[in-house]
């Protein structure tokens, strides 16, 4: 009868409307996940730049350390004890700076790894949400 057809069409319309709302929610979630992935990517890029700068600083300090070692070896006799003492103080300072840079590089490397893992997790969830969205769209179209 006509009333049954109208009721069936009304029910179908409400299901489609519900499916469209679900697709909208899934799309919004996917966009949010993409934004989070972009933010994580930016953090990784900054961490990599910081690590590269620290590596450069570390190489400079290492070169200075080697220069001081050479000077200490050349002036290791009794004729230059005051200069030798000053050089040894510089050497200790450089060693301390090298240890600090090594500690900072290790910390940055750990941060980079953590951010990278977060990015991988976000990308995995985004991919799942995108698949769910595509499936919902196909269901609505069917």
Image (cartoon, helix red, strand yellow):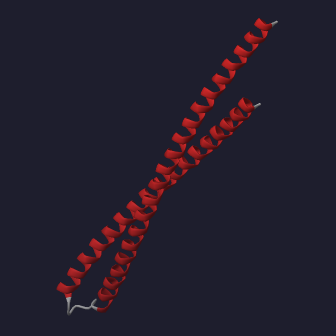
Which of the two residues, 70 or 110, is positioned nearer the viewer here?
A: 110
Residue visible at 42% across and 70% down in the picture:
55
Residue 128 horizontal/vertical position (percent):
65, 39
Residue visible at 69% across and 34% down in the picture:
137
Extreme residue toward the left, this view: 82
Residue visible at 64% across and 40% down in the picture:
130
Residue 69 horizontal/vertical position (percent):
34, 83
Relative to 29, is 43 on the left or the right? left
Residue 88 horizontal/vertical position (percent):
26, 79
Which of the two residues, 40 or 81, is positioned nearer the viewer here?
A: 40
79 versus 41 height, above or below: below
Which of the two residues, 89 or 38, is positioned nearer the viewer here?
A: 38
Residue 3 horizontal/vertical position (percent):
76, 6
87 versus 100 height, above or below: below
Relative to 6, is 23 on the left or the right? left
Total number of numbered discs in the rendering? 0
Residue visible at 57% across and 40% down in the picture:
30
3 versus 116 height, above or below: above
Extreme residue toward the right, this view: 1
* Quadrant, the N terminus: top right
Which image quadrant for residue 77? bottom left
* Quadrant, the C terminus: top right
């Amino acid at each position: 009868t006509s009333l049954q057809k109208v009721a069936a069409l009304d029910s179908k319309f409400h299901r489609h409307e519900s499916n469209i709302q679900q697709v909208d929610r899934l799309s919004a979630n996917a966009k949010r996940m993409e934004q989070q992935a972009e933010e994580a990517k930016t953090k990784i890029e900054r961490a990599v730049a910081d690590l590269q700068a620290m590596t450069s600083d570390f190489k400079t300090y290492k070169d200075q350390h080697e220069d001081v070692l050479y000077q200490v070896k050349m002036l290791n006799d009794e004729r230059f004890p005051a200069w030798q003492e000053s050089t040894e103080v510089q050497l200790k300072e450089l060693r301390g700076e090298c240890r600090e840079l090594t500690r900072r590089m290790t910390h940055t490397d750990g941060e980079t790894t953590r951010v990278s893992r977060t990015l991988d997790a976000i990308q995995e969830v985004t991919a799942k949400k995108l698949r769910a969205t595509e499936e919902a769209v196909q269901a609505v179209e069917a």
